[in-house]
Image (cartoon, rainbow, N blue to C red):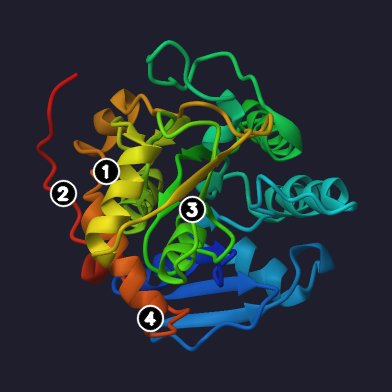
Amino acid sequence: MVAGGRVVAVVTGSAGFVGRMLVSTLAQDGPVIGIDRRRQAPTPGVTTITADLLDHTPEVREALAGATVVHHLAGSPDVRDARPDAAQWRYRDNVLATGAVLAAVPMSTPLLVASSSSVYGGSRGGRPSAEDDRLRPRGGYARSKVVVEQLCTARAQAGGRVAVIRPFTVAGEGQRPGMALSRWIAAAQAGEPLRVFGSLRRSRDITDVGHAVRALVELGALAVQGCDIGTVNLGTGTPLRLGEIVAALGRVLDIDVRTVVEPAELVEVPHTLADTTRLRGLLGWAPQTDIDGLIARQVACAAAGRTEVTSGVERAAAPEPVLQAG
């Protein structure tokens, strides 16, 4: 579908952490349709559809069938979900919902599907995780994302246009309250110790949400132009130790932060690190994270009680596309 010669983008999961910023950013360049089962705040240039993907409503089917490009972000995102029915919800929201989207989007329409870096089971020996590495998922969430990727592979083998995006820990304004950095901010502000799983020496590849959104927008544009994206990591390629993140939080809040180290569950991998070679080959740049600035924005957003966010371009200046080689 082209409105006045412009691309029409459809985003599933548009009321989520990344989805809200993505639809806001995409709307600067053309019409956007956001699909989520949660009611969404009005956004200029965005048509919202409140529906469950598995309800197969005519409105959703029409939007997916008529899009120029589709970003499928919807899913069950909680790695540590310990509810008795967590496996059922993951299968429903990750696997079945993705299957519904794959069936509704024409094979000729570029479709970008959000997977997760959790499919790697962490990085090993200090080496970044590359897209062709063997997958070693830990836990039900990661396994559900592997199945999602298998569905995408089947579509590609049948001639469909599909890209698999593997984001590494995304943080910034609008992050869900249950995610680690949000919980740490709330605990520090309440004068409570921060719960750290495993060790302060463990590390994460933290991706600024503004940079992640910019990358998704650019990858979608490449897909529309006919680029075969395949599977690509979305991360910085730079590890941050948990101790460094704790120290940054203390600097931003100007307080002494206390921590308590607890045993790590199986799903809590020691280290994550993205190999960004393929991403930089596609975009000419990769995300960079100023952890102090990211935390400051996230704290300010939480203090203002905001759940909505505006475009990543406004909130987080993305790096110029000239980064270190290698």
* 183 over 98 or under it: above or below: below
Residue 298 vs residue 221, the one in the foreground = 298
Marker disc for residue 319: 2
Asked if the residue at tag 1 contacts the one at tag 2, i.e. Cβ–Cβ closer than 8 Å, the answer is yes
Q: Earlier in the sequence, mark 3 or mark 1?
A: 3
Asked if the residue at tag 4 contacts the one at tag 3, i.e. Cβ–Cβ closer than 8 Å, the answer is no
**Amino acid type, label 4:** Ala
Q: Earlier in the sequence, mark 4 or mark 1?
A: 1
Residue that numbered label 1 is attached to: 287
Disc 3 or disc 4, which is closer to the eye?
A: 3
Residue that numbered label 3 is attached to: 194
Circle 3: element type: strand
Circle 2: element type: loop
Disc 3 or disc 1, which is closer to the eye?
A: 3
Residue that numbered label 4 is attached to: 303
Residue 19, given in percent of the width and then of the height, sits at 49, 64
Q: Earlier in the sequence, mark 2 or mark 3?
A: 3
Q: Earlier in the sequence, mark 4 or mark 2?
A: 4
Residue 7 vs residue 90, the one in the foreground = 90
Asked if the residue at tag 2 contacts the one at tag 4, i.e. Cβ–Cβ closer than 8 Å, the answer is no
Label 3 crowd bin: few (<14), some (14–19), many (20+), radius 10 Å: many
**Residue 107, located in which quarter of the rendered image?**
top right
Q: Is residue 1 left or right of residue 250?
A: right
Distance between the alpha carbons at the discs numbered 2 and 3: 30 Å
Residue 10, given in percent of the width and then of the height, sits at 52, 65
Q: Which residue is depicted at the point 54% across and 56% down?
A: 179
Q: Earlier in the sequence, mark 3 or mark 4?
A: 3
Q: Inspect this view and state whether residue 75 appears.
A: yes
* 31 over 148 or under it: above or below: below
Distance between the alpha carbons at the discs numbered 3 and 4: 19 Å
